[in-house]
Amino acid sequence: MTIYIALLRGINVGKNNRIKMADLKSLLETMGLEKVKTYIQSGNVLFESKDDATQLSQRLENEISKTFGFPVPVILRTAEEYEQIIRDCPFSFDSLMEGESIQLAFLANEPSQEKIEYLRSYESGPDECFIKGKEVYLFLRQSILDSKLAAQLPKLGVQATVRNWKTVIKLETMVKEMGNL
């Protein structure tokens, strides 16, 4: 069995695309996924499955759309991938100043080199990024809502969902509690 972290994009933000985590958990359990756990209302789910990530992601998207009536992109990472993602972060959470944050954008696919260079052109200024594979690490010296760099993420041309570093670490703790790492 593989532990997966599913990151749902764009649910429970504002008044649109509302999904109760208990309903989401129930749906995933009826799909045959095991040890399903959710974290906060923004679409973070851990579970175990024997299925392949690509097929599983598509299946989750289809079932969520069918059950809740709207499309929700689902980005999956295995527990092992997730651990590597955390190790790869070049920024130190311990030395953040007031108002600074580390955010992590999980991408569905790797962006093209051209799109990466475009995003990096917005690095000058207060914010920085580090891109590795299907992850974009953002070091923001202001609110993510005010960041010109973060605002360019959609222009990478791939589905993405962003989590703050505290959420990233909490999900890591939950994965470890599941007993595989």
Image: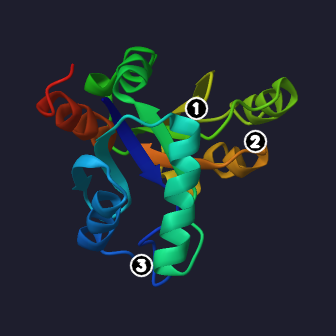
Q: Which residue occupies the foreground of this view, 117 or 106?
A: 106
Q: Earlier in the sequence, mark 3 or mark 1?
A: 3
Q: CA distance from mark 3 to mark 1?
A: 26 Å
Q: Which residue appears at 72% of the width and 44% of the height? A: 158
Find the residue positioned furthest to the bottom: 15
Q: CA distance from mark 2 to mark 3?
A: 26 Å
- Location of residue 83 in the rendering, given as x and y in whole percent from the top left corner: 35, 21
Instruction: Point out which mark residue 18 bears.
Output: 3
Q: Which residue occupies the foreground of this view, 55 or 125?
A: 55
Image quadrant assignment for residue 123 = top right
Residue 161 visible? The answer is: no
Q: Earlier in the sequence, mark 2 or mark 1?
A: 1
Foreground tag (3 vs 1): 3
- Secondary structure of the residue carrying tag 3 is loop
Foreground tag (2 vs 3): 3
Q: Residues within 10 Å of mark 1 (few under 14, many from 20)?
A: many
Amino acid bearing label 3:
Arg
Q: Are marks 2 and 1 in contact (CB under 8 Å)?
A: yes
Image quadrant assignment for residue 122 = top right
Compared to residue 61, the image places residue 50 above or below, namely above
Q: Residues within 10 Å of mark 3 (few under 14, many from 20)?
A: some
- Location of residue 139 in the rendering, given as x and y in whole percent from the top left corner: 49, 32
Q: CA distance from mark 2 to mark 1?
A: 10 Å
- Secondary structure of the residue carrying tag 1 is strand
Q: Which residue appears at 29% of the width and 44% of the height? A: 47
Query: Which residue is under mark 1?
Result: 136
Q: Which residue appears at 66% of the width and 49% of the height? A: 159
Query: Which residue is under mark 2?
Result: 156
